[in-house]
Structures are given as C-alpha cells and as structure tokens.
Image (tube, grey):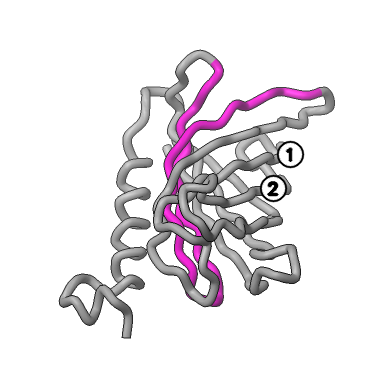
C-alpha cells in the first residue's frame, strides 16, 4: 500500500490518471488555426547498470503558444516498475535540412511515484533532446533522449536516462 493510501489521500495510480486527464484538458484549448500537438513515446527507462531498467511510456502535450523561440511542453512519464513523473517546461524547435527538427527541452517536475528506484527527491528536473521528421504532414516520428535528476538538491542524486521512440500528432480539428 502506498504512503498516499495509508495517509487517506488519493492512491498514486489514481493521482497519475487524474493528472494525465488534466493534461489532456489543458491541451484542448489552443489558438485558432494552430492545433495542440500530442506526443506518445515509449522506450528504455534506465540506461546505466546502477539504475533499474524498465519500459517507459510518456505522453506529452505541446500547446501552440510560443514565447520567441520557446514553446511550452507538459508531460507524464510512467514506467512498468511503478515510477511516475509529471513535468512542465519549455522546448525549442530548431528546423534542420531534410525536414528534420531538433528539439532540446528543459522541464522541472514532480515525482508522483518512485517505483523501485529512488531518484533522491520529489522535485526533479528533466533535460531532453529529440530528433524528429515528418514523413506525413500531420505526423512526426522521432527519437528522444532525456535525463532526469534532482540537480543535487538532495544528498542522493543518481539521475536516470531515458531513450525513446516518439510519434506526435496534432489534435483533431
């Protein structure tokens, strides 16, 4: 039983589901003519032998708003071993030749469930780099690499790396 369940609060899996629903609702509002983009990715959570490896699944919402070159991103990462991480931050979309796009990002977040790995703190920071291409006008495929760490806010700071494949599509009309 989780600490949230023992304390009479919402169980962690229900909290993660509620937050994912909130992300979807956030993504349903956008500027006219500009669709919200949803991205779903999966891959390897934990690339070093010291960190338990698991299948990771991530959902991102990318609203169309921009602040100069920065665009908002919000997401939920979960793993098969029970880890759940909710984040919100910014990304920069850099067009490259051949229709490629490089997207570095940074997002602070909160660890909702530790699973079987302890990252040292509930407050964590996600740095990411994604390379994608749009073979079809409305679909982008990419690979992503991200690192989650508490930036030495706690004594224990193992960090974890995640390697994923991603598909992004705009929300319906």
Query: Residue 131 got which mark?
Result: 1
Q: Which residues are magenta?
A: 69-96
Up/down of 127 relative to 46, above or below: above
Query: Is there CB contact under 8 Å for labels 2 and 1?
Result: yes
Relative side of 66 to 99, left or right: left
Relative side of 54 to 86, left or right: right
**Residue depicted at x 63% and y 50%:** 147
Q: Nearer the viewer, residue 76 or 159?
A: 159
Q: In the image, residue 26 lies at what x, y percent?
A: 32, 42
Considering every residue shown, the one lying at the far bottom of the view is 1
Considering every residue shown, the one lying at the far front of the view is 155
Query: Residue 144 got which mark?
Result: 2
Can residue 170 be seen?
yes
**Residue depicted at x 56% and y 63%:** 57
Q: Nearer the viewer, residue 132 or 145?
A: 145
Q: In the image, residue 77 lies at what x, y percent?
A: 50, 58
**Residue depicted at x 29% and y 76%:** 3
- Mark 2 residue crowding within 10 angstroms, few (<14) / some (14–19) / many (20+): many
Query: Residue 158 got which mark?
Result: none
Can residue 172 be seen?
no
Relative side of 167 to 154, left or right: right
Main SS of the magenta segment?
Answer: strand
């Amino acid at each position: 039983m989780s600490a949230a369940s023992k304390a009479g609060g919402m169980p962690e899996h229900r909290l993660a589901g509620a937050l994912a629903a909130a992300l979807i609702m956030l993504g349903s509002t956008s500027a006219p003519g500009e669709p919200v983009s949803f991205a779903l990715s999966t891959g390897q959570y934990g690339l070093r032998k010291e960190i338990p490896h698991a299948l990771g699944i991530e959902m991102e919402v990318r609203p169309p708003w921009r602040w100069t070159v920065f665009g908002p991103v919000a997401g939920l990462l979960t793993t098969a071993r029970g880890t759940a991480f909710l984040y919100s931050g910014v990304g920069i979309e850099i067009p490259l030749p051949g229709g490629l796009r490089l997207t570095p990002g940074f997002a602070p977040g909160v660890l909702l469930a530790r699973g079987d790995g302890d990252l040292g703190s509930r407050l964590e920071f996600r740095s990411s780099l994604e390379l994608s291409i749009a073979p079809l006008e409305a679909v982008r495929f990419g690979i992503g690499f991200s690192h989650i760490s508490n930036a030495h806010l706690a004594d224990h700071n193992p960090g974890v790396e995640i390697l994923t494949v991603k598909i992004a599509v705009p929300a319906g009309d």
